[in-house]
Image (spheres, rainbow, N blue to C red):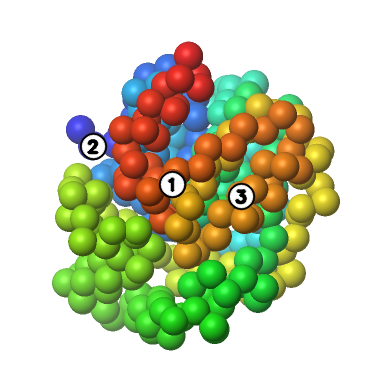
Amino acid sequence: MTWKRTIVETSRGTFEVFEKGQGRPLAVTHLYSEFNETGDYFAEAFVESHHVYLINLKECGGSDRAKAPHELTMLESVLDLEAIRSTLGYESWDFAGHSTGGMLACVYGIYFSGSLDTLIIANAAAREYMTFSKDCIYNESHPEFHNMQSMIEGLKKEDLSSEARKELTVERTKLSLWKPQNYERYFNQGIEKKMSALRMNFFSRELHTFDVTRKLKLIAAKVMVVSGAHDVQCPPSYSEEIAEAIPGAVHHRFLESNHYPHLEERLKFRQMITDYFD
């Protein structure tokens, strides 16, 4: 079943949104992914318990282009999410973010806890995670650093053929799997998405000054933190830091996962979601 495409006109611009599932509303997005009707693997984990809104931020897919650079910041993106929530008519909703979506979730919770019932922060960090962690694949000391950087730069090329893009995406993703030989089993639903090079480049700059750790205590929504014990992108120590700083946060650590516990330990992840919201 494909996702239903909707265009949401807000006071802050027009956004392309994809919907699927039934139940309480939950929003999902990522700082630089471009979603389409095929959906998203992380978002798919919530469709049995929620009516999920998969959102393309500005510069992604059919959403508006940014008129000024500051519109690509995390705070401005959160303000856009609030405009979408308001336009859809919800007083509050749940929000789930994976990776950079989880970083955005931290900012969302800090400034708009009143709009959030539950916040799910998966495989993320509340501050810049590259410089001081040799376990991070974006740290120059990591053995796969140069390989990962080469693939990222390749994916930014607009003239890249679809076949070459798919091959690069697969190889890049394998670097973040605890058992890369299982790639085909994990990614088997025909879900395809692109990356906004403009947003990716902006995030790479914003990340160097990103640190909201001291404000995490301001989050008043219910919070679930998820991490993979072998995560090479956002090492699990950063998830532990988030969970310890947010009052009442619950932390689920998946011991046989890297950056994708919702796929690497799919059944356990979905049971966790079911148990939590039941």
Residue type at the position of mark 3: Ser
Residue bearing mark 3: 239
Q: Which mark is first along the chain, 3 or 2?
A: 2
Q: Position of residue 169 (x, y in %)?
A: 29, 68
Q: Is residue 22 in view?
A: yes
Q: Residue at x 32, y 45 (%)?
A: 263
Sooner in the amino-acid sequence: mark 1 or mark 2: 2
**Pointer 2 residue:** 2
Amino acid type, callout 2: Thr
Q: Residue at x 57, y 48 (%)?
A: 102
Cβ atoms at labels 1 and 2 below 8 Å apart: no
Q: Which is nearer the eye, 248 or 40?
A: 248
Q: Quadrant of residue 95?
A: top right
Q: Nearer the viewer, residue 21 or 238?
A: 238
Task: Give the foreground label among 2 and 3.
Answer: 3
| Badge 3: residue crowd in 10 Å (few <14, some 14–19, many ≥20) | many
**Kind of element beneath mark 3:** helix
- Seen from the viewer's position, the closer of residues 24 and 268 is 268
Cα distance between the residues tagged 2 and 3:
32 Å
The x and y percentages for residue 2 are 23, 37
| Proximity of marks 2 and 3: CB atoms separated by less than 8 Å | no
Which quadrant would the N terminus be assigned to in this image? Answer: top left
Residue 153, percent across and down? 41, 81
